Amino acid sequence: MALRGLAASGPSSRGPLDEAVAAAEERGAPAVVVAAGGTPEDDEEDEGRGRGLLRWDGFSAWLHCVCVVGFDLELGQAVEVIYPQHSKLTDKEKTNICYLSFPDSNSGCLGDTQFCFRFRQSSGRRVSLHCLLDHYDKDLPVYLKKDPAYFYGYVYFRQVRDKSLKRGYFQKSLVLISKLPYIHFFHTVLKQIAPEYFEKSEPYLEAACNDVDRWPAPVPGKTLHLPIMGVVMKVRIPTCHDKPGTTQIAQLTQQADTHISVILPTVHEVDLFRCFCPVFLHSQMLWELVLLGEPLVVMAPSPSESSETVLALVNCISPLKYFSDFRPYFTIHDSEFKEYTTRTQAPPSVILGVTNPFFAKTLQHWPHIIRIGDLKPAGEIPKQVKVKKLKNLKTLDSKPGVYTSYKPYLSRDEEIIKQLQKGVQQKRPSEAQSVILRRYFLELTQSFIIPLERYVASLMPLQKSISPWKSPPQLRQFLPEEFMKTLEKTGPQLTSRIKGDWIGLYRHFLKSPNFDGWFKTRRKEMTQKLEALHLEALCEEDLLLWTQKHTEVETVDLVLKLKNKLLQADREHLPVKPDTMEKLRTHIDAIILALPEDLQGILLKTGMT
C-alpha cells in the first residue's frame, strides 16, 4: 500500500510534526515539513497559500485523519489504511473506529450506507501543533465548538455481493475522523469521494487528501470555496453573532457561480422533521428530556437512523449546547460499554443510539427509550407511536414507541402538531417541515432561556464599580430562589403561549448538566468582560503621572502587572477593543523609557511590550 505522506514515527510521545521540526533544527535546516517525494514546486505552491503553515496543517484544520476499515476473515474488522500516514491513533482509538465503522450484522445494510459516530479521545494524548487553528473556535456558536475530549467519525459503508470473495460480500468503510461537528458537510464530502474511492483505491484517496490540505481554514462567518476531486463546494460556517435560526449562505446564492458545483445551506444540521416524524406528537416531551439531560436511548434498525435521530435530539435545544455525552451510534464493543450499561448505579446523563437487539435487554432499566422503525422518505408519514410503559419493552422487535413513565412539565402545544399534520396532508417537502419544527424548537428554547439570561445579566457589577487600581469586582452569586421570584413578572409567559409547570421545569433544569455547562460558559464570558472593562479603565488613566508619585519598585511592579494583563488578554481572547491593547503597549513603553537605563534593559527583555 504505497501511500505518500510523512513517515510514521516511533513510539515517542512527541507528535510527528514536533519531531520533524526538531530534526530540522538539529540539522540547521529550515523547519518546513513536506511529504516524502514532495518537489520544490509543491513547496512553492504550499507557501503560495500565504498561510505560513506546515505541510498537512491545512488538512488538519478540517480532519484528524482518513481511515479505511475492511473485513478480514481472520481478524474481523481492521483498519487497512490511515492517511496521512503520520496521523496518530492509539490502539484503543483504532479498536473503537473498527467496530463503529460497520453496522451490526443484524442491520442488513446492503448497498451504500452513511452514518456518524462519536468516541472518546484517549487520555494523555498530546495537544497537536494544530492548536494554532483553535482560535477560530472563539467565534463559533457554543454548540459548534470543538470538544477536546471527543472525535467524530463520518462513515460511508459499502456492502455488495461479490462471489469472488470467500465471505461472498465486499464490505468496506471510508471514514473521516474529525474534531468538527459538521455532520451535513462531511456527509456531503463523503458522497463526493467515497463511491469513486471504492473503484480507484489509494491513489484517489491521496489526491482527495491533497485537495483538503489546500483548503482555506474553517473560519466562521466566511464564505468558503472548497474544491475536492473536480467538485467545488460553497459553504459558510456559522458564527456566534448570527441571528439564531437564519442561514446566511442563501443570501450569497443570488449571483450565478458557474464554477460552484454544490452549495450547502448548512454545515451541521440534520433533516429534523424526517428524524422526529415517527414521534412528532411527543416532540415537546423529547425536547424536555434533552433539555434536562435525562438518560435516553434510541433503538433503531440501522446506524443511519440511530445516528440521525440522536443528532436531531441534540440539535433540538439549539442554540443551547447539549453538555452531556451523546453517541449517535453505540455498540457492545465500545470502550465505554460497561460504564454506560452497569446496573450498580443510575444511568448516566447520555443519549445513546443503538441497533443491536442485545441492548433491549441490557438497557431496559434506563428510564427513557425511543424505539423507531425505518425512517420513511420525505412525503410519507409513519403511524404515530404512543408513549408506553417501560415494562412493555422486551426486545428490539417491540413495536415502535416512546417507552417512559416521564410526565412532561409543559402542556402539549397542539398548534405545532396541527401545522405539521397539515403539511403532511399537503405533501409539503420535508425541508419545509424541518424549518417549521426547527423554528418551533428555537422559540421554545429561547422562551425558556431568556429569563435565565436576564437574571444572570443582573449578577454583573455596575461599570462604575470598576476601579483601575483595584482587582476587577466579582459576579454576584446565582441564587435559585431569587431567580424563581423573577419568573412571576418576567418569565417565559411573555414570549410563549405554552402553559404548564414552568417553575418545576426550571427547578429540574438547575440540577442538570446542561445548566451547569451553560452557567459556567456565561460566567466565564462575563468574567472576561469584567477583565476587558478593567483594562479599558486602566488605559484611560495617566499612568506616567502615577509613576512620578510612586517608587521605582512600585513602578516596576506596575509594568510587570500590565504586561501580564496584555498576555492574559491575548491568551484568553478577552473582548477588548484593538485600540485598547495598543494604548496599553504605549503606556508600558512610556513608563519603561522614564526609568533608569539598567531597569529599561531588564524590563524590555521581560515578556512582551
Image: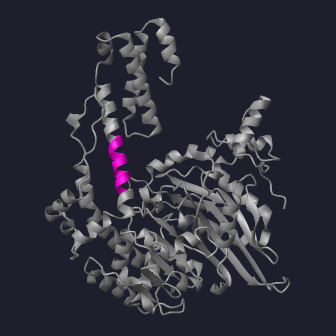
Q: Residue farthest to the front?
A: 344
Residue 44 pos. (x, y %): 72, 40
Q: Residue farthest to the left?
A: 489
Q: Is residue 521 magenta?
A: yes
Q: Is residue 29 visible?
A: no
Quadrant of the rendering where the N terminus is positioned = bottom right
What residue is rendered at 33% in x and 64% in y? Answer: 511
What residue is rendered at 50% in x and 48% in y? Answer: 136
Along the viewing direction, whichever of 343 and 148 lies nearer the viewer: 343
Along the viewing direction, whichever of 340 and 261 lies nearer the viewer: 340
Which range of residues does the magenta coloring cover?
Answer: 518-528
Query: Which quadrant holds residue 51?
Result: top right
Query: Which quadrant holds residue 581?
Result: top left
Along the viewing direction, whichever of 483 and 199 lies nearer the viewer: 483
Residue 351 pos. (x, y %): 47, 72
How many numbered marks are there? 0
Residue 281 pos. (x, y %): 35, 85
